[in-house]
Image: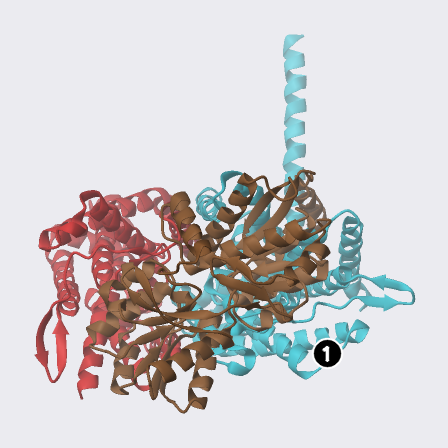
Amino acid sequence: MKSSLTAVLALAFVVGCTKNENEIVVGEYGSLTGGMATFGVSTHKGIQLAFDEINDKGGIKSKKIKLITLDDQGKDTEVASVVTKLITQHKAVAILGEVASGLSKVAAPIAQQNKVPMITPSSTNPEVTKLGEYIFRVCFIDPFQGFVMAKFASENLKAKKAAIFRDVKNDYSVGLADVFAAEFKKMGGEIVIDTAYQQNDIDFKAQLTQIKSKTPDVIFVPGYYTEVGLIAKQAKELALTAPLLGGDGWDSPKLNEIGKDAINGNYFSNHYTTESTDPATIEFVTKFKAKYNEVPDGLAALGYDAARILAAAMERTTELTPSNIRDEIAKTKEFIGATGKITINEERNAVKSAVVVQVENENRKYVTTVSP
Amino acid sequence: MRSKIRAPLLALLIVNVLVMLLGFFTDAYVQLNILFIVVNVLMALSLNLVNGFTGQFSLGHAGFMAVGAYTAVFFVTKIYFAPGLLGLFLIGIYSIAGGLLAALAGYLVGLPSLRLRGDYLAIVTLGFGEIIRVVLLNMEFLGGPRGIAGIPPIPSIQIGSFEISSFYVAFFYASSWAVVCFFSLWRLCYSQYGLSFLGVREDEIAAEAMGVPTTKVKVRAFVLSSFFAGVAGSLMAHFTSYISPASFSFLLSVNAVIMVVLGGMGSLTGSILAAAIITVLPEALRPLQEITGVDLRMVIYALALVLIMIIRPTGLFGDREWPEIWRSWKTTRNLKKQTAAQKQSQSARSSS
Amino acid sequence: MQDLIQHLINGLGLGAIYALIALGYTMVYGVLQMINFAHSDVYMVGAFAAYYAARWFNLESMPGVVSFAILLLAAITGCALLGLLIERFAYRPLRNAPKLNILITAIGVSLLLEYSGQVIFGADPKVFPEVLNNTPLFEMAGVSFKLFDFLVIGVGLVAMAVLHFLIYHTKQGRAMRAVSVNPRVASILGVNVDRTIVFTFVLGSALAGVGSVLVGVKYPKIEPLMGMMIGLKAFVAAVLGGIGNIMGAVLGGLIMGLSEEMVVAYLSSTYRDAVAFGILILILIVRPSGLLGRNQTEKL
């Protein structure tokens, strides 16, 4: 009975997979609903913007790109199912996705097995691209940003004692925190306290009070803007004056809206500054504002770059097959993206320099550049 | 002895032959979802023992699955693994190990639950599930929040020059577990001993008065249910190739409960049907997202849940099994036919 | 010492928030013996009602007590209406169904609100309008005491007192207690059971509305899933204090807040949630009816 049922349902599955010759199908998977939706939606907006732009200019090899975005709700079983669907049913020639490294790790073996290139816009865990030669990324990896901030703390801010406040539910945050701790110690600093919160917490006063009692010079908070805004606010209420440091997860206009003036004066590593005179960055920000009527966050910028690197690679191929596209993505050099000049190295990671910026209301003031 | 294993073997054979035939004209996407159906069947069947037959209320099934999954994955990735037939054998051993550890966890959760019932038990099991998740988050050697990636899929098997692909081996393996689970639960629940589960569900005090050791019965239900939940967890780990604490959230437990209630509390065949529906429904609704642009699947899912509870609170099958429903349906159909025939002859007579 | 005082204030401030939400759970449970899982999402909707009201009236440009009152009113109205609808269309048809069905319906309503919220409000966090300043009131032992903590604790205590009065000293309260003991007998004695239950729901939801505004003012980040964890913890608080007991909810909330704070401060921050549930399990094993709950004997 079970099987007859599955047979019927299987038939229901296999519908609507006709291929249009004048289209290039690119698949995207991301959490459009569920606990991580805010990040998935941002990324999607960036990707959509890039492809709309390319299609308006006539597409690639006079073919339009058809972006198929499927929601994975941030669940790994859904990711497995969705990515398989994109590859086998929609015949996507390439896949873009996931913010969370864990979910990219579900998708990567599937893409690898089917020999379809996958570019993750913002999975920072080093393991992700090690899962196969078809897996790429356009963001920093954890060790790099952790190193950047450790170096900035000890050299520029002359910090001797650092506190770490990590999001224990988030692999990105834990990755950065671990590297920061190791590097900062190597540079002669001391980690006076290493404490944690969990994504979606709203009260951080207990940990902040404890941090305050250890009188650190800097506090490393490698989380997402969703929590960092509140953390900054509560730190200020507790008269905790040591500057907060963070990574590119901070990059969002929401950071100021939530943190108000409490977030000002703090530093984080990012791909660009708002003072940037780089035309690619400026162009991206204006276009994004025009289309969505909001300021883009870092995830949107990374989604935009991932999509454009993919498009550029497709343009360079002689024939649009997944393996050709893979080879061309691997050859990406000095690509001028919204998040800086991107070169894909042999480990299929993006090599680009990071800037450390200081928050000043909506502005991100340039402080220093760290090259890899 | 022979007659005892004939039915399970037959069921296994039929299911596998059907899926094999189906396999010729399906792609990897459908195949993956077939595997998920089997995992969910295991999950729903095992939970039905506690929630349906014994009338206890567990909201922590995901926690037991996590224990099973992490144990099996720990063995596979950190201890020893080999490809081919040996690999399948090892996966089997590791799944059992995962199941046993989950059963131990079930025993620990079952014990205090003896004093509690209804909503309180639900909350306590929910709490246990969350605690297991928090503990996993803090275990660095199990990857913490990063989870464990690169879990090997169920291997393909080479027999001479003929290769059985990974999917068929995986389905054979998973369906074997489902068959084992289904038949052991069926024979347990519909035996004389199984009446003690129902006794606890219907009236604990009366059952106690009749000499049913209610505490022991409850703990046994928890242990057995957790064992199969652990096995289901280990299967899921192999099918997704990655696990993290986030994979075993409260929502997974809720999903399991929903399957049990949708199928009917105390109906094993109902659980199988419900597991298939709950797995396929969100996937079948996907095209809708491509049309509307927003993902309304969960909204529809939640709405359907509420409506089912209001319109058909007993679930699809109630506490009856498929053969019984089939028979009663046939009887009513025959009755209808008879009455129709009678009416016809009556009207024929009156007109004449 | 300074740290300890600070921790105590933090814990009480947090606990008062748990208490406010726990009151809603406890009221509904007290009358209906059901866990209203959707309560935490009613609370979420309250926060969004206030958010949209603030944008509608442009309240952020004129901060002050009046604006705060308007926010409260918006949230209370929104929540009360939603509570009314949920009771009427989801729970009432199931009044005599088995407990598990009711619980699953509640979970269904909760999921429905959360995911509809993500579709309607958007998944990204919104910033709650800032209408009050968290002005420091006074300073003691190097610790500054701020307005919001007192506001939350004060509102929590007032709500408790009002509820207590309502339940034990008014006619409506007597009806609620009667329904809670035995709805059928209550209806024989002339209590309008449906109306009493609706009243309970509306009141509980209104409390969620109050809670949402206070949380919004204190932690100005709202999003469709904001109710999940806080709702769960508030429920734990209600059980801890003895579910169905008004004082118990407040006591439970404060204990939860304080113990979480102390766990983070002196044990381990990562086990914060585990400890919250650990306490619950311990209490339920040792004293299943909660701290202030009545011990119920098994009826034959």
* Camera-side residue of C141 and B200: C141
Quarter of the image with the C terminus of chain B is top right
Give the chain ID for the red colour. C
Give the percent coordinates (x, y) of residue B177.
Answer: 69, 65
Give the percent coordinates (x, y) of residue C242.
Answer: 27, 69
Give the chain ID for the brown colour. A
Q: Is residue C233 visible?
A: no
Q: Is residue C125 left or right of residue B204?
A: left
* Camera-side residue of A223 and C40: A223
In the figure, A20 relative to A311: above or below?
above
Q: Colour of chain B?
A: cyan
In this figure, which colouring scheme has been used for the structure? by chain
Give the percent coordinates (x, y) of residue A75.
Answer: 53, 60
Q: Name the residue located 71 percent from the left edge and 82 percent from the top edge.
A: B80
Q: Name the residue located 23 percent from the left edge and 44 percent from the top edge.
A: C195
Splitting the image into 4 quarters, where does residue A278 fall? bottom left
Judging from the image, mark 1 belongs to the subunit labelled B
Q: Is residue C111 left or right of residue B347?
A: left
Quarter of the image with the N terminus of chain B is bottom right
Query: In what element is the residue under mark 1?
Result: loop
